[in-house]
Amino acid sequence: MNAQHHDSSAHPSWSFTDGRSMPVGTLYCIGRNYADHAAEMQASVPTDPIVFLKPPAALIPSGNTLVLPSWTSDVHHEVECVVVLGQDLRDCNKHDAWSAIAGVGVGLDLTARDVQQRAKSAGHPWAVAKSWYGSAPVSTIVPFEQSAQGPWDLRCSVNGELRQNGSTAAMERSIPMLIQYLASVFSLRRGDAIFTGTPAGVGPIRSGDLVAGELGTIARVELHVG
Ligand code: MG
């Protein structure tokens, strides 16, 4: 695949493998949803989900080149299963949560770890560390009915070297539980998505790296670090 520089002027859209597209809404991201990653961060699995947001402009399609921000020297990859919603949701049961899923893909929750650690120490929010332009590379989205509905292996490699090797079966909170929780707090919209957390093995990426995330054999995201 040829690397492309991302066009920042267009409103981002989800591209589905069946040719559909959908405008990108809010990206809801879940922290510490895998016990092994919480442990590597010297943190516990929280009682209530940790939620943070990325704006639509954070999303870049697979295959693009991203120049890392100058204000961080420690950007980490976090490979995650990404769930795209196909309908609006406000308070829902588990069945409605499943029915609202339009598709699934794989994304990288790119994190300025140095900035995040300073924010954590000061008790400040994570928005700058997590939500910057280009911080959410995501694959083409697989229609949910064609996805076998999980669980899927979840892997990340950097320059062909395997760094993260988990399974969505190890989520502390399942996909419908996360949707139900978010729908009880926010008003979810068609085109919103959920980054469902990362397994252990996060680490730095650098200029010149090729980062690849995989959700089983159904979805793949590639990022060229410029
Ligand atoms: Mg994450």
Image (spheres, rainbow, N blue to C red):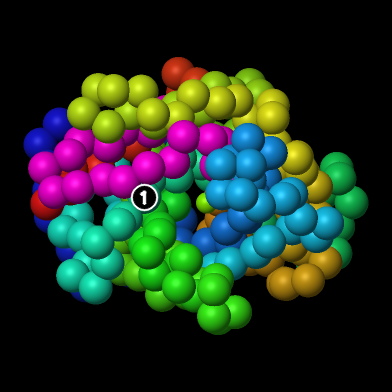
Residue occupying the point 59% across, 61% down: 28
Foreground: 25 or 221?
221
The quarter holding residue 191 reads bottom right
Residue occupying the point 54% across, 80% down: 122
Q: Is residue 107 visible?
A: no
Q: Residue furthest top?
A: 217
Q: Is residue 22 above or below residue 107?
A: below
- On the image, the x and y values in percent for residue 59 come to 37, 59
Residue 178 vs residue 205: left or right? right
The quarter holding residue 222 reads top left
Residue 130 vs residue 66: left or right? right
Residue 179 vs residue 31: left or right? right
How many residues crowd mark 1 within 10 Å: few (<14), some (14–19), many (20+)? some
Residue 192 vs residue 132: left or right? right
Residue occupying the point 66% across, 24% down: 151
The magenta stretch is 196-215
In the image, is the residue at mark 1 within 8 Å of ligand 1 by its beta carbon? no
Foreground: 118 or 189?
118
- On the image, the x and y values in percent for residue 106 come to 46, 38
Q: Is residue 99 above or below residue 89?
A: above
Q: Main secondary structure of the magenta part?
A: loop
Residue 200 is a magenta residue: yes
Foreground: 96 or 183?
183
Q: Is residue 50 above or below residue 44?
A: below
- On the image, the x and y values in percent for residue 111 come to 40, 58
Residue annotated with mark 1: 76
Q: Residue furthest right?
A: 93
Instruction: Residue type at mark 1: give it.
Output: His
- On the image, the x and y values in percent for residue 145 come to 63, 29
The quarter holding residue 140 reads top left
